[in-house]
Image: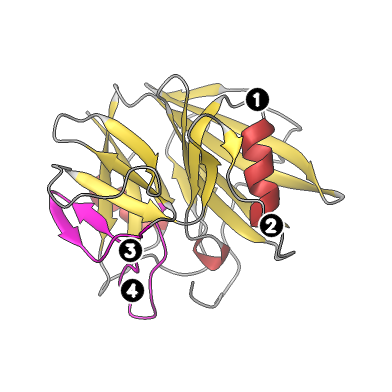
């Protein structure tokens, strides 16, 4: 994660304790929550997506990173979230697939992978359970670490290191919907985030951590329920949600 260079742009609307799910666009819902953690009220924004009504694409420009707003406007995206970890040159440290072309090397026995098949179906899996196979046909994919919720809904990360940071994650619920999740304050440790995701009323089946800290960013374009959490730095790697 790059070092922060400025303050992030976030929504100016005060977060309620729980806004409940609100329709933002066809197939997309927004929920804002304040989650009690370590004596704090952590602001969490969640975008829940019906994958039958949208398309997912990986954005990857290691030599020309963009802000989330620039990613969204360039690709006419409905929503954008930061991707996985990258090095100082903007190169992904794990496997990603963009328009069927793989880049980088897959995590082995750790982390998770979000992927889109050529037919448009989505999957999110623990790489320790189902490793990446270079022979499998995938249209888009990105990886994150660590796994936060293991398949079936239980907490996957229990090592408590006491390090709090801005967080972002991607999840799949038991109904097959994709959730993009971000907390723009340094409230959660990874173990706390793992526990909360597994026990909250989100009905999650599996979840994986993305590159948080200064890279945390989530943008939702909506005329009545927009959300904007800009990262501190431009991003070379994002996940885009596009209209079908």
Judge whether 86 appears above or below 20 on screen.
below
- The answer to whether 170 appears left or right of 33 in the picture is left
Q: Position of residue 145 (x, y in %)?
A: 47, 57
Sequence-wise, the earlier of marks 4 and 1 is 4
Tell me the number on the disc at residue 201. Answer: 1
Residue that numbered label 4 is attached to: 90
Q: Nearer the viewer, mark 4 or mark 1?
A: 1
Q: Which residues are magenta?
A: 82-108
- The answer to whether 70 appears left or right of 152 in the picture is left
Q: Residue at x 51, y 29 (%)?
A: 152
Residue that numbered label 2 is attached to: 189
Q: Are marks 2 and 1 in contact (CB under 8 Å)?
A: no
Cα–Cα span, label 1 and label 3: 31 Å
Q: Are marks 3 and 2 in contact (CB under 8 Å)?
A: no
Cα–Cα span, label 2 and label 1: 20 Å
Q: Residue at x 44, y 56 (%)?
A: 110
Q: Decide which of 161, 86 is in the foreground and name it.
A: 161
Tell me the number on the disc at residue 94. Answer: 3
Cα–Cα span, label 4 and label 2: 25 Å
* Disc 2 crowd, CA 10 A, few/some/many (<14, 14-19, 20+): many
């Amino acid at each position: 994660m790059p070092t922060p260079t400025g303050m992030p742009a976030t929504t100016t609307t005060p977060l309620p304790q729980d806004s409940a799910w609100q329709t933002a666009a066809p197939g997309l819902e927004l929920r804002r929550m304040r989650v009690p953690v370590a004596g704090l009220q952590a602001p969490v924004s969640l975008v829940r997506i019906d994958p039958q009504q949208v398309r997912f694409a990986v954005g990857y420009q290691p030599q020309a990173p963009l802000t989330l707003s620039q990613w969204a406007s360039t690709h006419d995206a409905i929503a954008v979230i930061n991707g996985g970890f990258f090095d100082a040159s903007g190169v992904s440290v794990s496997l990603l697939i963009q328009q069927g072309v793989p880049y980088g090397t897959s995590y082995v026995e750790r982390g998770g992978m979000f992927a889109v098949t050529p037919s448009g179906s989505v999957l999110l899996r623990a790489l320790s359970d189902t490793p990446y196979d270079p022979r499998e046909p995938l249209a888009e994919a990105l990886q994150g670490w660590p796994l936060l919720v293991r398949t079936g809904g239980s907490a996957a990360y229990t090592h408590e290191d006491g390090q709090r940071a801005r967080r972002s994650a991607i999840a799949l619920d038991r109904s097959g919907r994709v959730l993009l999740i971000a907390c723009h304050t340094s409230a959660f440790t990874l173990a706390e985030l793992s526990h909360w995701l597994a026990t909250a009323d989100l009905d999650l089946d599996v979840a994986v951590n993305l590159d948080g800290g200064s890279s945390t960013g989530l943008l939702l374009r909506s005329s009545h329920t927009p959300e904007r959490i800009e990262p501190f730095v431009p991003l070379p790697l994002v996940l885009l949600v596009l209209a079908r």
